Image: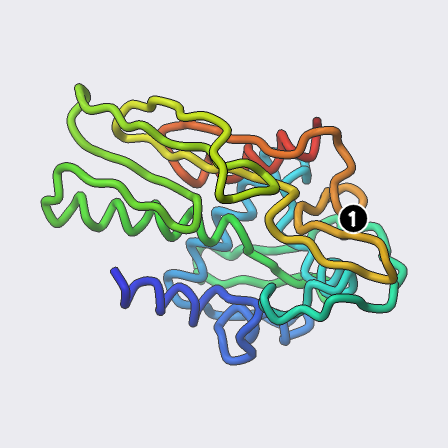
Amino acid sequence: MESWCYLVEETLSRFLPTSELSQLNSLNGRLFLPSKMLYEAVKTASYYYNETNGIFNPFLYHSIQTLGYNQSFEQLPNNQLPQEIAAFDAVNPIMIHKGMRSIQLASNVGLDLGGIAKGWSIQQMANQLKKKGTSLGGIDGGGDIVTWGPASKHWSIALSHPFDLSKNLMSIKVKSNSGIATSSVGKRLWKVNGHTHHHIIDGRISKPSSSELLQVTVVSEDLTVSEVYAKCMLILG
């Protein structure tokens, strides 16, 4: 499982210049033949982009870089100069050629798989364990949780406070074979010219969400689904 996490990072991270995703983002619209992992992750992200009419938008790489989130969060400076953000206007941001198993981004588009890469990869990890015969288990990947086991098994999941991780708001009971994802505006914050930004970007305007919601938790039978729709609900308010 540790090896799987390293492989995910080396393949899907936008912060590693040597990652396969970074290679794809550097091609400026040229055709790319990806590994199976990158192909499946991008295909999944593109599917949810279409299903949510762009509320979930994995093609905001350039916008989030401009907003100042251009390196791993713990390395961000405390303050940065503001920059103007153009609204996302790519009509066809990606072409996925199923026959060739290839990917082609529009010339002005970059991919930031972000949260969906985490949720998707943890779900894949759970699927691998189940195939290997692990009949009961749970994985907590930085707050994204997947559980599986007999139908009679239930799990108690604590939900943390959005601005104080040492405190819990409540606990919920979920059945086995669940994916639990929480999206919050309080976990990754940085300042640009005195103005605080968070990492939940509204794909329609290419700016941090301004809805009245602070935190959303979604429970479904698949962690990827929960990951996507927790973010969408937080954006929509």
- Spot occupied by residue 191 in the image (x, y as percentages of width and height): 78, 59
Residue 199, compared with residue 37, is above or below; it is: above
Q: Quick one: which residue is furthest to the bottom in this view?
A: 18
- Disc 1 residue type? Lys
Q: Quick one: which residue is furthest to the top in this view?
A: 152
Q: What is the basis of the colouring in this image?
A: rainbow
The part of the image, by quadrant, that contains residue 190 is: bottom right
Quadrant including the C terminus: top right
Residue 210, compared with residue 107, is above or below; it is: above
- Spot occupied by residue 123 in the image (x, y as percentages of width and height): 34, 45
- With 226 as the anchor, is 176 left or right in this view? left
Task: Please tell me which residue is depicted at 62% across the width and 29% down the height of the picture.
Answer: 233
Specify few, some or many for label 1: CA neighbours under 10 Å numbering under 14, 14-19, or 20 or more: many
- With 79 as the anchor, is 36 left or right in this view? left
Q: Quick one: which residue is furthest to the left in this view?
A: 133
Task: Please tell me which residue is depicted at 47% across the width and 70% down the height of the picture.
Answer: 33
Q: Quick one: which residue is furthest to the front in this view?
A: 166
Task: Please tell me which residue is depicted at 34% across the width and 63% down the height of the picture.
Answer: 5
- Spot occupied by residue 159 in the image (x, y as percentages of width and height): 46, 33
Q: Which residue is mark 1?
A: 207
SS label for mark 1: strand
Of residues 145 and 221, which is closer to you in this image?
Answer: 145
- With 187 as the anchor, is 121 left or right in this view? left
The part of the image, by quadrant, that contains residue 29 is: bottom right
Task: Please tell me which residue is depicted at 25% across the width and 45% down the height of the picture.
Answer: 127
